[in-house]
Amino acid sequence: MRTLTRTIVVALFSLPLMSGIASAYELVMPTLDYRTGPYAPNGIPFANGYGDYLNMLNERDGGINGARISLIPCETGYNTKRGVECYENTKNEGESGALVFQPLSTGITYQLIPKASVDQIPIFSMGYGRTSAANGKVFPWVFNFPATYWSQATVFVQYIAEQEGGMENLKGKKIALVYHNSAYGKEPIRTLESAAEKFGFEFMALPVDHPGQEQKATWLQIRREKPDWVMMWGWGVMNQVAIKEAASIRYPMNRFIGVWWSGSENDVLPAGAAADGYLSGAFHQPGDGFPVHDDIKKHVYDKGMGLGERERIGEVLYNRGMVAAMWSSEAIRKAMEIHGTNEVKGVHVRDGFEALEVDEARLKELGMEGFTIPVKITCENHEGPGQVALQQWDAKAKQWNLVSDFYEPLRDITGPLIAEDSAQYAAENSVTERSCN
Amino acid sequence: MIYRETGQFKANYQDDQALFPIEQDRYVIFGILFLVFGVVPYLMNEYWLNAILLPFLIYSLAALGLNILTGYCGQLSLGTGAFMAVGAFSIYKLMVAVPDLGFIPLVVLSGLITAAVGTLFGLPSLRIKGFYLAVATLAAQFFLIWLFNKVGWFYNYSASGMINSPPMTVFGFTITGPEGNMTAKYYLVAAIVAVFALAAKNIARGRIGRNWMAIRDMDIAAELIGVRPLIAKLSAFAVSSFYVGMAGALYFAVWLGSAEATEAFDINQSFLVLFMIIIGGLGSVLGSFLGAAFLVILPIMLKNILVDGLGTDSALATHLEFIIVGVLIIGFLIVEPHGLARLWRIAKEKLRLWPFPY
């Protein structure tokens, strides 16, 4: 009892003073996980993929260029306030301080965007968060490659047009958006409104409140209005419920497209065979057939250090966590190369992100040939390629398959919107645009 | 012995009516104020100030507001989250529209706007009470949040419905925005909370507070002795919403920096503040602070001890935290159903007699 009390007292008083007294320079990478709460089914595989890849680098190569990675998990429960607490708690950890944050929540990303420039830590909101952060002139510390929600929305419009037989056939069609009623879900609305105006289709937006277990009314409305296509911006338990509800009103699954956060095994399995043909966005391959997966199994799972279950390696969200870790670690490697030292800090890693170039050849070296699209980031373009493909669920084989090529986004729609939104942010927060020459 | 008031003679009415009639209490209060303003900001690092003390102070202010309504006047409210949202969206619109007024007047102004809204939603309390009133305030919660989410004017038509607090200064120190000075933020919030906590204590023991308590204890009897329920109930709603609105304004502008109506001010927020005053003690200023400490500081401390101190897995630690906080809430309520403030009152009584209890 006495020792326990002492441990607690010591822990209590040493918390604010704790700093790494490690002998070698460690690369501190905090992860804001959520393994609890209504979003845990999606949060867990992502966190496992992110952590496993970095642990694999530690075990296989001894870290990045010989500097070991120190992973610091912090549980947010997808709750913004807890996320901010986690950020404050981990940002100064160790000698290097936090090198990059991957919030995996649009709400937390919005909180961290203004803090990032002050604390000089880059935010890598991979394919989520604030879309206008693609404008690197206004948001030097935020990176949202490989594509934004707005690019994705325009890609879905193009896919629909292709299925309907051309852009001109969009006229008079009805497209519904079922969205999580939060900052995240609202992101594509403006883009789809502009697209509706431009191509002459009818657009209807149907909000679903957190956490999304109750959607009867929404789907009743869809049954009544009979939209030709339904898009979904959902997350967590909302996805499963939506797909089950769609199945129950017999909405054709091959006309139902989810954002890439609404397209994992967890989302479609509960609906069983009825989910067959459901579509979603994607920027990487599903499955565990790449050499990098073998390395993870060999160096991490065979040693009993895996964060998740061995059978679940290669799930969509697992691979997404892995690709996020890959780009982050490549940015750190680039930062080491630019600054000629292993002892990089957040400010250096930002430079690494801005000069990041992961092409086909580099992907092959990493054991990820054809796994994802090549990415090249510049000072003004933090969105990178912006290309999106579609994947489709095969309920018999229980697997996702990419069913389309990577589409270019309609930049004539997204470009002005990004300029407008980032200008509004700059004006409200008195940020001056930096020059990129 | 420690708390003996023997020999503290009150020679005039002023002494007898002092806010803290016992000398020892005054020392304690001055001691706490000295700690809060003189010592804490120099001892604590940024993490403590920003992640622990700021939310604690802001939630204390919200709990104080709800305690005025529920603890002193006996009107149950489940609309705290929505009233905080009114404060937050008011200050956002004001900060964008009239930044020249200065930050502190804007906080007070958004409190006043919330007071007006709160009074409006307090009108049903004249006809219904108890659980039925709780349901009526629940309607306020859902309606207001829906409104802030639906009508673009409130968030200046931003694409995501988020509001961001633009940078503002108080006496030359940046208070809001990313470059806010942490110590200045702490001082500002602590000062506002201290001033309004003293004000609450003063209101509660005066004529208005006694009217509230009369209504709480038995409204028909209160009416018979000449308390006007209309004035008493609506003033409780107004003052309570004023406090809650200021708390909401500080919560958004100083602490979070950006917020969306559906997440930051949802129904859980209302329950959280309600639980604070139930655990801390209904009808007690001290109870509001103790309740806020219990529900804001304790979970973070537990997390830090479990994860950093004992090396528990972060997800397991969160589950353990739910269990421990839940057990403690039940435990405290069994030991003392009147809340933590009551425990302190009992301790005070004992200390008065100690060491000769007979």
Image (cartoon, coloured by chain):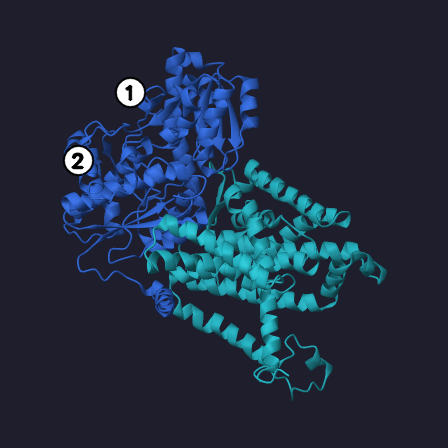
Instruction: Determine whether the residue tagged by mark 2 lies in a helix, strand or loop.
Output: loop
Which one is in front, A254 or B331?
A: B331
Which chain appears cyan?
Answer: B
Badge 2 crowding class, 10 Å Cα cut-off, few under 14, some 14 to 19, many 20 or more, is some
Give residue A366's mark: 2
Looking at the colours in the rendered structure, which chain would you say is drawn in blue?
Answer: A
Residue ranking furthest to the right: B224
Please indicate whether residue A264 sits to the left or right of residue B245 in the image: left
Question: Where residue A172 sits in the image (x, y, percent)?
Answer: 50, 14
Which of pointers 2 and 1 lies earlier in the amino acid sequence? 2
The numbered mark 1 sits on a residue in which chain?
A
Amino acid type, callout 1: Asp
- In the picture as drawn, the residue positioned furthest to the bottom comes out as B7
- Quadrant housing residue B305: bottom left
Q: Which mark is residue A405?
A: 1
Above-or-below relation of B324 to A237: below
Whole-angstrom CA distance, mark 2 to mark 1, is 23 Å
| Residue B168 percent across, percent down from the top left | 47, 55
Give the camera-side residue of A299 and B237.
Answer: A299
